[in-house]
Image (cartoon, grey):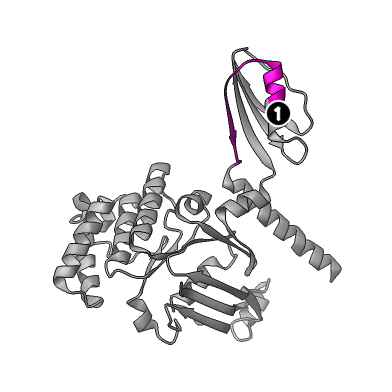
Amino acid sequence: MTHAIEIDELSKTFTVRERPQGRFAALRSLWHAPKREVIAVDRISLRIEAGERVAFVGPNGAGKSTTIKMLSGILHPTSGRVRVAGHVPWQERQQLAYRIGTVFGQRSQLWQHLPASDTFDLLAAIYDQDPATYRARRGVLVDAFEIGAHLHRPVRQLSLGQRMRCEIVASLLHAPEIVFLDEPTIGLDVSARATIRDLVREQAERHGRTVLLTSHDTGDMERVCARVIVIHGGRILLDETIDALRRGYIRRKLVTLRTVEPTIELALAGVRVVKRAPHRTDLEVDVDITPIDAVVQAALRGGQLNDLTVEDPPMDDVVQAIYARAEADARLRECAS
């Protein structure tokens, strides 16, 4: 496999102006404003293979969007080396544009007062698409994303979910090898998010596209990607498969017991009752203290089971645990210095 994206020691520092307090200090700052440097991305290195679907997650200000903008050539890095599809993004931006697609959830590439179909036609011309090939590809994407009924309405009249489908279609019209999706489901309702996730994953799998997805929604990460990179404070904290992430960070299980008896009592260390209802008991089990098979055996001794399910906690809990550990480590470093 070839590397679709190669990053070595990539950093980005911004210089920001401080706003001093007080009227006279603010007036003086018009000529001599104090400045400070903010490190947005701090010497990150990673490899993404062709065809991989990777989630790039982190809290606000972690450096996700800044990294995406450097990879797509919008921003120049302060230092480091990057190759995307074999190109240096900020030096070969025009050549790279033919090989990547981008969707920024908070910035539209569609003209608000025009129908999406007009933007599609313009993008086909910009990317030098053969007319017959373009029409065929557009037809396939329009059907896949179910936007045929919305193509000829002004974009400003579309719902957010409809617009995001059109945004993703626009990014795929020139058949890019690599797709950058920056918060593509932000603001969408549950149903629209699920639809967008499934469509993105299906398109990537069918055409072997590389996907780098940033999101605050862990559902995006689980439904679309097989690998997750967690960034915090501009540094990569963790780079794992979704399965390895669960195994490494989840030490609790959610157990649901459905019993013939109205209630069942379990007195086990590390087992907490989360919720009770007639003939149902929801438990949280710390598997470091009590293994699941011990819980099952105790439940069988305590009553007759109709059903039993064992689940992992939501991925949100995993990611929050990673952030909490990172913040605790940062505080320890500050105290040590």
**Residue closest to the eye, 157 or 226:** 226
Q: Position of residue 20 (x, y in %)?
A: 67, 74
The magenta span reads 297-313
Q: Position of residue 196 (x, y in %)?
A: 37, 51
The kind of residue on which mark 1 rests is: Val
Residue 300 inside the magenta-drawn segment: yes
Q: Is residue 268 above or below residue 235?
A: above
Left or right: where 292 falls relative to 148: right
Q: Position of residue 296 (x, y in %)?
A: 67, 27
Q: Position of residue 140 (x, y in %)?
A: 22, 57
In percent of the image, x 76 and y 41: which residue is there? Answer: 288
- Circle 1 residue: 295
In percent of the image, x 61 and y 54: which residue is there? Answer: 244
Report the quarter where the C terminus lies. bottom right
Q: Is residue 263 above or below residue 333?
A: above
On the image, which quarter does residue 293 sit in? Answer: top right
In percent of the image, x 76 and y 58: which residue is there? Answer: 328
Residue at far top of view:
261
**Residue 91 visible to the viewer:** yes
Residue 136 inside the magenta-drawn segment: no
In percent of the image, x 50 and y 54: which residue is there? Answer: 221
**Residue 78 visible to the viewer:** no
Left or right: where 187 falls relative to 78: left
Q: Is residue 172 above or below residue 41?
A: above
